Amino acid sequence: MQSGLTDVFAAERVRAIAAAHQAERGALLPILHDIQAEFGYVDPAVEPVLADALNLSTAEVHGVISFYRDFRREPAGRVTVRLCRAEACQAMGANELVEHAEASLGVPVGETTRDGAVTLDEVFCLGNCALGPAVQVGERLHGRVTPARFDALLGEAR
Amino acid sequence: MKVYIPRDSAARSVGADEVAERIAAAAAAAGRGAEVVRTGTRGMLWLEPLVEVETPAGRMGYGPVQLEDVDGLVAAGMLDGAEHELSLGLVDQLDWMRSQRRVTFARVGVIDPLSAEDYTAHGGLAGLRRALDMAPADVVTEVTDSGLRGRGGAGFPTGIKWKTVLGAQAEQKFICCNADEGDSGTFADRMLIEGDPFTLIEGMTIAAHAVGATEGYVYLRSEYPDAVATLRSAIDIAYTHGWLGERVLGSDLRFDLHVRVGAGAYICGEETSMLESLEGKRGTVRPKPPIPALEGLFGQPTVVNNVLSLGSVPAIMADGAAAFAELGVGRSRGTQVFQLGGNIARGGIVETEFGVTLGELVQIFGGGTASGRPVRAVQVGGPLGAYLPVERFDLPMDYEAFAASGAMVGHGGIVVFDDTVDMAGMARFAMEFCAEESCGRCTPCRVGAVRGVETIDRIRAGEDREKNLVLLEDLCELMTDGSLCAMGGLTPMPVRSAVKHFGEDFGK
């Protein structure tokens, strides 16, 4: 899907994913999660394909995709790191950790390192509020992340 | 011999998986057959990874156990419950545990969360069996009599909500569990789902019987991948045991349960926005009325309850309404699962009766700050809750007492800050968060939050302080009165309380 959804195979896969959820009510979110799991992001080219498959307007599909933070419009790096910036982690130095991460990786929050290895992102609460600052590397949660531990985690993940 | 180590994501976040693997290997190397059981967490998070060893006297605790401690612990006789510098004694006898009253969390940290045998051996299904023998209206009465109020934050009586849905005439009714636990400082929903998911399933099934619903959804946030996986496994297991599906436990009840994963929108924790999201739409807020109990999911009568509300129902049905109602104070009945987080020495879960004071939770259970500096502020009830100073530590945890003080108990989350906190910065963050997460449906929230950030910036920069503080108060009043839901309506609470109690940070 790197070439975009113009390719016939990708469009067929999107239709197949939509069909797999046919029996579920209001299944657009599960469908979008599956598309993102398979392709790594939700290419704008899926909008007309999904609209057609689900009998929605393209605007409706676009509106849903753009509402939710989880759905990426372009591929992420090989590893996505999310730093919690909510209050409980702020009380334990989350803002300082964000500054360190940006300096250490050389990219601001929301961007991917030039070598395509790491996407640095933020999140508001990972439910690890007694062991902050919390960081998610891929799907794996980490607690009490000091700047040194952050660098070690990134070293393992890269 | 059994060794218990949590599989809760908080415990895993500080190395529980690695410790569990190492203990299994070290036990095997020592020629000992140790069965490692992965449980939920006891909620003593500063002791994680907490290892418990079964002994004739009870479960002996060791913690926090680091990977490099394991070989020494096994050599010192941990597998026989021997003393060690990491020994904590019998876990059930620790002050932290003994001072609590665990009802909703009775099994969390004790059982294997995905063992149906463990669940029933520890009292699981007793509530559902009793409910199925009762008429739906009697179940609703029992829940009403217990005094249970919505644990998600609003505190609306659960039984009244159920009664409305029971009385509604419709072909299809739904049970929706709001597990979009997006508030910073709250993690009890996640811990219950990861530590005792069958309790939630049982509570939802009782609700289905009580109101005449046949289909349920758990809306679970995507930030909790471990909880999603555990709940999906638990639902599969429940189906194979006949706890879900056609003829639940041999009765005439049919109930199907689905998990839906959110997509990173805080606003979807608001019930009508959650319903929109479940329908596959943008998570914008619906005006009320109509209330979801009459026109909810896909326009049908719908029970929308928080994880802890539904998770409390099995115990209420098993032990009777009176046992629950006799706990608590005033109109706040039963127990609440308080969550201690932020800059705190002993963070975690404290389930206790309503009426415990804020100070007891922060100072006695929590042990003050993690940094060792003085406590300056605590935020109670999530990002939309008030900031309170130490002078208010005498406040009892009670919905009405908090409301009378311009604060809210909310979901029971308490976030502690030490004396290095900049409260004007926290007030700005509250507005910034609202601006970021507003669904955009109503103007006071969508535009007000942006203007709030700008106004606080001017105050912090020393620009026309007096005038801008008046303007900020005016804006807060408008957002409180004019917003469609709690997002815009309650964002002023942390802002106003910060100005009121910590005026010096705003140059007052």
Image (cartoon, rainbow, N blue to C red):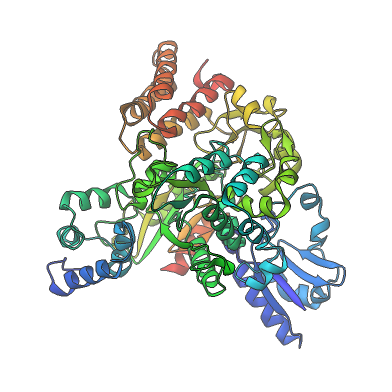
Answer whether residue B356 is visible to the viewer in this image. no
The image quadrant of residue B410 is top right
In this orientation, which residue lies closer to the viewer: B457 or B192?
A: B192
In this orientation, which residue lies closer to the viewer: B302 or B210?
A: B210
| Residue at x 52%, y 68% (from the top left corner) | B247
Residue B193 percent location from the top left of the image: 56, 59
| Residue at x 62%, y 43% (from the top left corner) | B141
Residue B155 percent location from the top left of the image: 57, 36
Answer whether residue A18 is visible to the viewer in this image. yes
Residue B99 percent location from the top left of the image: 79, 47
What quarter of the picture does the C terminus of chain A occupy?
A: bottom left
Q: Residue furthest bottom?
A: B31
The total of numbered circles placed on residues is 0
In this orientation, which residue lies closer to the viewer: B311 or A139?
A: B311
Residue B250 percent location from the top left of the image: 58, 69
Residue B158 drawn above or below residue B424: below
Residue B64 drawn above or below residue B386: below
Q: Is residue B342 left or right of residue B476?
A: right
In this orientation, which residue lies closer to the viewer: B53 or A132?
A: B53
| Residue at x 79%, y 72% (from the top left corner) | B54
Residue A50 drawn above or below residue B388: below
The image quadrant of residue B393 is top right
Residue A97 drawn above or below residue B63: above
What quarter of the picture does the N terminus of chain A occupy?
A: bottom left
Q: Is residue B48 left or right of residue B247?
A: right
The image quadrant of residue B67 is bottom right
